[in-house]
Amino acid sequence: MEKGREKREPTYTRAQLSVFTGFLGSGKTTVLHDLLCQIRHERVGVIVNEWGDLSVDEALLRNTGVENIRELLGGQIFCSCLSGSFLSTIGSLLDLNVTTILVETSGLAKPATLRELVGEAEKRFDGRIEYQGMVCVIDGERFLKLRSVVKALDEQVAYSDRFIITKADRGDPETIQRIIQVLRKSKPGAEIVTRAGKPIQFHTLFKREEALHGIPDPYDPRWAGWGEGGRPGTITIRSKDPVGREGLNSFLNRMLSQTFRIKGIVLVQKEANPILIDGVEGTVQLFPLEAEKDPIRPERMGITLIWKGPAPSREQVLQAWRECTGTEGV
C-alpha cells in the first residue's frame, strides 16, 4: 500500500424494512400503491410474495414508477420454503443501495416465525437494515366474519404493530368500531388508520418516534393449523386463446362461492388491453389494464383461484372452464 493511502471500506446505505400483511383481498396492494406513489422518487425496493405461482400484484405496482420490484412465488416468506429466498432478495436490494424496503406478504401469511426471520436478517446484513415493524391491512367488510374460520387473521394481527382498516366507506360504522375494539384488545395503543376510498398519507402511517411493540414468541400453540377449513388449496389455470367476456363471467361466477380469492390477467376477445380479474368472496370485477411500455409477458397471464379449504381436482376446474368459455385451458 502506498504511503499515506488508507484502505477504505465500502460504504452502504442503511435501509428501513417494513412488512405489510393482511388476508386475501384485504387491500394490501392498494395500500402499497398509495405509498409508492408518494415515495416514487426515493430509493425504494419492493418484495411481493404470492401464495400461488402467478404474480398479478407486481404488474399493478410497477405503474407507480418504482422499478426495484422482486417477486417470491409459491408459498409464504415465514415458511422455510421461501424464507431463504426472502433473505437473499433483501440482500439483492441492499446491493442497489435502496433506503426503503417494503414487503407485501401473501394473504395467507402465518407470521409466527417473524422474530426469527427479522433476527436472521439483522444478523446477516450486519446493521444494514432497520426493522420498522409490520402493518396489518384489515378488510373492513369481511374481517369479523373471516376471523371465526381462518386462524391466520388473528395471527397476522398478533404479530403486527400498526393497522390499516380498508373499505371503511363500505362497511357500517358499528362494524368498523367492533373491528377497532378487536385490534385494541390484541394490541393496546397500536396505531390504527382507516382508508375510506382515498389514499392514506405515508407520513401519518409511520411515526418514527413510536416504539414498536415487541414481537411475540414464535410457535404459539394458538396459531397451529389453519382453522376449520384446513389449508386453502390453490390452482392456477391458463387459457390457450382469448376468451369471450360472457363465458369468462360465467366461469368466475361459478367459482366464487368456493373461493376466498380469484385474481389474474387474461386476454378477452375484442378487448384492446389485457383484463385484470379481481374476485373476493362473492364479488368479481374486471378491469382493463392500461397499456404499458413493455407488454405483459405470456407467463404472467392466467387465473389463480384460492379455495376455502382443499382444492378440487385440476381436471374439474378445467372442465368448468371448457363448459363456460368454449376454450381449452392448461
Image: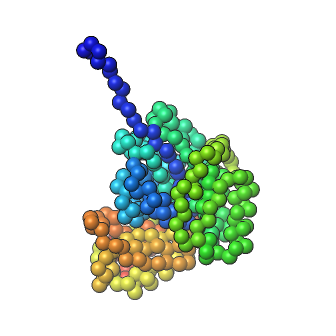
Where is 192 relative to 97, above or below? below
> For residue 216, which quarter of the picture?
top right
How far across and how far down the image is residue 302, in percent?
37, 69
Q: Residue at x 44, y 56 (%)?
A: 39
How far across and how far down the image is residue 307, in percent?
53, 68
Q: Residue at x 27, y 66 (%)?
A: 293
Can residue 248 be seen here? yes
Seen as rendered, the residue at the extreme front is: 4
Seen as rendered, the residue at the extreme bottom is: 246
Q: Which quadrant: the C terminus? A: bottom left
Q: How many marks?
A: 0
Q: Residue at x 54, y 63 (%)?
A: 200
In the image shown, does 229 or 181 lie closer to the viewer? 181
In the image shown, does 10 or 163 lie closer to the viewer? 10
Can residue 152 be seen here? no
Seen as rendered, the residue at the extreme left is: 2
Q: Which quadrant: the N terminus? A: top left
Q: Residue at x 66, y 63 (%)?
A: 147
In the image, taking residue 141 as reference, residue 127 lies left or right, namely: left
Coloration mode: rainbow
In the image, taking residue 117 as reference, residue 193 lies left or right, namely: right
In the image shown, does 266 or 41 lie closer to the viewer? 41
> For residue 244, which quarter of the picture?
bottom left
In the image, taking residue 114 as reference, residue 40 lies left or right, namely: left
How far across and how far down the image is residue 245, in percent?
38, 84
In the image shown, does 137 or 257 lie closer to the viewer? 137
